[in-house]
Amino acid sequence: MLELIMVIPLLTGVISMFVPVWIGRGILIVTALLHLQLTVFGWLGKITPVFPDYFAVTHEGMLILMVTSFVFLFISLYAVAYMNEAEISSEPIYTGCTLFFLATMSMVTLADHLIVLWIAIEATTLMSAPLIFLNRSKTALEATWKYVMICSVGIALALLGCFFVVLAMDLGGVHVPISFSSLGTVADKLDPVWLKAGFIFLIIGYGTKMGLAPMHTWLPDAHSEAPSPASALLSGALLNCAFLGVYRGHQLMYQAGLGDFSGNILIGFGLLSMLIAAIFIFNQTGYKRMLAYSSIENMGIIAFGVGIGGLATYGAMLHLIHHSLIKSSLFLSSGNVLLGYGSKLIDKTGNMAKLFPKTFTAFFAGFAGISGFPPFGIFISELLIIMGAFQQGRGLEVSIFILALILVFAGASRLVTKMCFARCDNPHILVKENLARTLPSYALLLASLVLCIWLPDSLYETILSAIATIGGGVNG
């Protein structure tokens, strides 16, 4: 029963809110392990959906589900140690909502029905909002309301896009289920005008949740105010789920022969997101906001690669995987920084290399990885996207792409260097670092290193099968 992947965390989430904290922590870890095991079974085709009209195993969905489940396990291991030292009184709420969040993200990746996908993405907003407000500060309340309001407006526009896609189904009385797999078989018969209108609203709606500019304004506040394990989930998992909604829309457009239309829109939003991130990252005063703008940049990179097509699409999928691993690691390391210095401000940190050597190693390595330096996988993914863009004759677009990468690195490197090496006068260390809070970051970085050197055949074939549906491939 494929649906168990989302039902189990939903049930354990309810239980964890009514048991002692130490039992809730055990439930969180056990659920993460069980979820990963069920995801592997789904990946191998050993479990099938009970409701095939609404849920299905797709290559792109299983890829994002596997990434989500993998990072969730290590974030959960970190969260147990983090919550213990952060002394957050509402830990049962965190544990329950985190498991609900996992259930809704799993639902997104398994959804094949147009409206079920919309419901699942909206549900991720409702389940993750309490995580942002967990600290119950004034700024957390503001960030939560901004997140809920902006994303809900975006999701409402996505619903309008779904209605336009349904209106495009003028098939002469022939009934076709409103599922992506069924629509793909009759895509060439859909009304192109309604389909184009539907995609525009889908990318604006789901792009809001994905963090594409100019609909990104909720993201820096939400990522900054949420506890670090929740920030890691928002950036390393949630944004991918929102991207899946955009990807499915682009997939349908390609099958209808309108891939150039949707591809150019994706390129435009991708480059705009990268440039917005490049501009705003220079003046950031908080390191978690800096990482949030980095997420906006990387979502733009993925959108750009998918829009270009060919080899760049393969690079975009690799980028999605490595961004989730490295950015999750960075947010976990930022949690250690926050516990140690007691501040989110860059000016209140410094000399991390000496004061917190284990955290420094993970944080600086993560920064190198997210900036595209070898031997981390983002170096390969960005190189493939650039090569794919040149193959498609997109000289101007790839020039803007490279410029944005350079600007983001220039802005972020100044801030990271200050955190790691600048003198910190009279530092007051609140909490010392320990292995329980550093090993998960190292494990996620190690996963990126391993996948850069060795990509399992099953993962390689899954990526190829996923991008084949939008004209992507390693042969351009």
Image: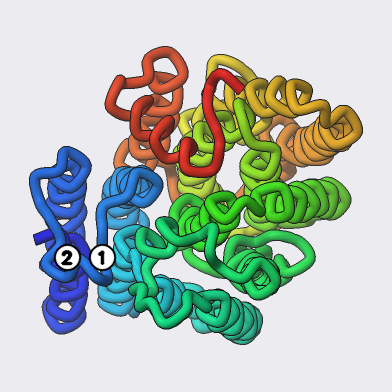
Is 403 or 117 nearer to us in this picture? 117
Q: List x then y, in percent, for residue 385.
A: 67, 28
Question: Badge 2: few (under 14), some or many (20 or more) residues near its Cα, within 10 Å?
Answer: many
CB atoms of marks 2 and 1 within 8 Å: yes
Q: Which mark is first along the chain, 1 or 2?
A: 2
Q: Secondary structure at mark 2?
A: loop
Q: Which residue is mark 1?
A: 55
Residue assigned mark 2: 3
Residue shown at 58% from the left, 50% from the top: 254
Q: Quadrant of residue 436?
A: top left
Q: Quadrant of residue 95?
A: bottom left
Does 313 appear above or below 149?
A: above
For the rendered model, the colour scheme is rainbow
Q: Nearer the viewer, mark 2 or mark 1?
A: 1
How far, Cα to Cα, is label 2 from label 1?
Answer: 8 Å
The amino acid type of the residue labelled 1 equals: Phe
Q: Nearer the viewer, residue 428 or 396?
A: 396
Which of these two is toward me, 182 or 171?
171
Above/below status of 4 relative to 125: above
Name the residue rendered at 34%, 44% in the picture. Answer: 59
**Which of the 4 image quadrants contains residue 199?**
bottom right
Q: The residue tagged with tag 1: helix, strand or loop?
A: loop
Q: Residue drawn 18% across and 54% down?
A: 35
Q: Is residue 160 visible?
A: yes
Residue 347 spot, x, y in % from top left = 76, 51
As drawn, 44 above or below 273: above
How crowded is the residue under tag 1: few (<14 C-alpha within 10 Å), some, or many (20+)?
many
